[in-house]
Amino acid sequence: MLTHFDFWGILKHRKRNVILKKSSIAFGLWAMAATCGCGTNGPELHSVSGIVIGATDKISAIAGSSVEISLKDRPTVRGFGQIEPDGAFEIQSLHLGELRGGALEGEYNLRLLPNDEDEESRKRALSAFSKKYLQFETSGLQVIVPASDPIEIRL
């Protein structure tokens, strides 16, 4: 005797199992991400501030330039801070598409980037500090985050 074969019923059952499995995997990944210590706001950032020290004319020449830091063991992790007219700066980092104050914990190389608002500003900034400060490899400047004291960069 022939029994009725429900092809569409079996197909629906398999689709439902696949959807349930994918949903379970997605939920598991979400749960792992939520509990990995990063939280919903991303990893913990530590405040990093500093000052560029030098002759008054040099400091005013580099106002608008930037200090950039690069994590030694992950060079693509960077932060930057704009140098104010008094030489002060505060490092900010981009996390989850949002600019936030501070930087991840770690050891960083540091360099100066001249103000490039216009050619005159760039020339003025470049005349105020040695070209060695333009590259992480040659600047000789480093910082460990979290830092107990503000960074001091002497020109």
Image (cartoon, grey):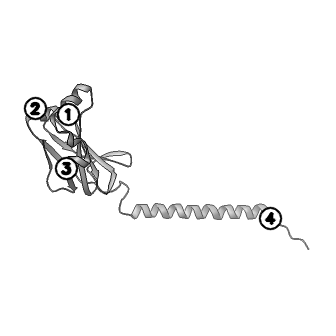
Q: Earlier in the sequence, mark 4 or mark 2?
A: 4
**Residue at horizontal 38%, vertical 56%?**
40
Image disc number at residue 57:
2
Asked whether disc 3 touches disc 2, contact meaning CB atoms under 8 Å apart, the reply is no
Q: Looking at the image, is mark 3 or mark 2 nearer the viewer?
A: 3
Going by the image, does 60 lie left or right of 136? Answer: left
Asked whether disc 4 touches disc 2, contact meaning CB atoms under 8 Å apart, the reply is no
Are there few (<14), some (14-19), or many (20+) residues within 10 Å of tag 1? many
Q: How far apart are marks 3 and 1 (CA)?
A: 18 Å
Residue named by callout 3? 140
| Badge 2 amino acid | Asp
| SS class, disc 1 | helix
| Viewer-nearest residue: 91 or 9 | 91
Quadrant housing residue 98: top left
Q: Which of marks 3 and 4 is nearer the N terminus?
A: 4
Q: Which of marks 1 and 2 is nearer the N terminus?
A: 2
Q: Distance between the residues labelled 4 and 2?
A: 86 Å
| SS class, disc 2 | helix
Are there few (<14), some (14-19), or many (20+) residues within 10 Å of tag 4? few
| Badge 3 amino acid | Gly
**Residue at horizontal 62%, vertical 60%?**
19
- Residue 107 image position (x, y, % from top left): 25, 57
| SS class, disc 3 | loop
Q: Distance between the residues labelled 3 and 4?
A: 74 Å
- Residue 118 image position (x, y, % from top left): 27, 26
Going by the image, does 141 lie left or right of 14? Answer: left
Q: Looking at the image, is mark 4 or mark 2 nearer the viewer?
A: 2
The vertical placement of 74 against 125, above or below, is: below
**Residue at horizontal 54%, vertical 63%?**
25
On-image quarter of the N terminus: bottom right
Residue named by callout 4? 6
